[in-house]
Every structure is written in C-alpha cells, then in structure tokens.
Image (cartoon, rainbow, N blue to C red):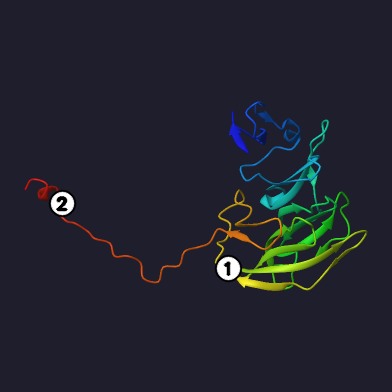
Amino acid sequence: MSLRDGNSRFHVKATSSLWTENALTAVTARRLSFAASPSDWSPDGRFLLYTDLGEENVLHLYVLPMAGDGEAYRLVSGPSADAQGQFSPDGHWVAYSSNESGRWQVCVTPFPGREGKRQLSTEGGQQPRWRRDGKELFFLSRDRKLMSVSVKAGSTFQFSAPTALFQTHAHEPIGAEEVFTYDLSASGRRFLINAEIERNNPPPVDLILNWAAQLKK
C-alpha cells in the first residue's frame, strides 16, 4: 500500500524486474484509509484479502476481485472488528480474527460464501496461519502461546480442540500494517517468531559531563 498524490492505493509488482509496477485501481471504488493493509492472496490469484477501517473506524476484512472491474466487499457482515485474514491452501475457507465475542477469537468462514462461521479458539486468539497442506491451523493465544488445531475441511469444516505447542514471546502487532508477528515452514514444524527481548539487567549508561573540556587536553 502506498500514499501517492494524496490517495491510498495498493500497488503490485512481479518479483521479476521485467514487469513494471501497477496500481490496483479497482479498489478505489471504496476509498482506502491510512490503515489499509493487504493480508493474503487467494491460491488461484483471483482475490486479494485486506484489512481497512470501515464503519465507525472499526477494522474490517474486505475481498477485492482481481478480474474485471470488481468492487471490494466485506468478507463477513456485522459491526464487530475482523482482521488478519488468511485463505486456506485450497481457497475454500478463510481464517481470521474477530472480536465479536468481546475479545479476539480465531474464526473460520467458507469462501466465497458468507455463512457458516466457526470459532476455533476458546480462550482468545489471534494471527491464524495454515499449514501448507491445510490439515493444521496455528494461532497465538492471549498469553502468547502458539496453539495448534487439527483441521479436516471438505463440504463441512471439522476441527479439533486447540492444543498448546509452546510458550512464545511474540510481541503484539504495532499497528494495522503489521498483520502477523510469526511465520512457519510448509511442514508446520519450524517457526520464525518476531519476539520481544527481555532484559532483566539492562546495561549501565555512562554519562560524561563537561566532555568538550576533555577534548582540549
């Protein structure tokens, strides 16, 4: 996302330098705010999932069709905030965080349908991420534990109770632009976590007074 000429727009550019940068003009049908942030592409590349401020300055998830003159629309309806959307590897489901219950919880909804939402977390959670084969979903609990949910997706969405894998020191996202603070390998066996550094005994600070006079000696 870039702010140019006073307008917020998403821009796309191939990793190869052979393709010039292009603005996604279709999204301008609904004006982007300073907090707009893309979170995921659909596996077939037909849809962009992003977060932006909606009604009453509340974060909502929007879907932007990439073909034709498609106009962005809400992923799920309602006044509650929703963010951190992630398409499943088969593109039939979207995992996201919602505060509809009064605190952030991890939910899954079918795509492109908008009905049949399921809540996966039980004690709060954010930042859902799929394993590459779609058989496991991870998220961070309220106390920063990395949680795992086994998934069996088909015509219905079946999932296990969340299981704690290990304690992390992942920091809270600083703003809407920082969607996730961790990532995982395709197998889901290794994790890269942006963690807070705890310093119980910070190094001392030396303060030199009248240092300019010392230079004359």
Badge 2 amino acid: Trp
Q: In the picture shown, does residue 76 fall above or below 124? A: above
* Residue occupying image coordinates x 63% and y 39%: 1
Q: Is residue 48 visible?
A: yes
* Residue occupying image coordinates x 79% and y 52%: 89
Q: In the picture shown, does residue 43 fall above or below 148? A: above
* Residue occupying image coordinates x 88% and y 51%: 113
Badge 1 amino acid: Thr
The label shown at residue 168 is 1
Q: Position of residue 142 (x, y in %)?
A: 63, 69
Q: Position of residue 112 (x, y in %)?
A: 87, 49
Q: Nearer the viewer, residue 91 or 184?
A: 184
- The image quadrant of residue 7 is top right
- How many numbered marks appear? 2
Q: Nearer the viewer, residue 153 or 82?
A: 153
Disc 2 or 1, which lies upstream in sequence?
Answer: 1
The label shown at residue 211 is 2
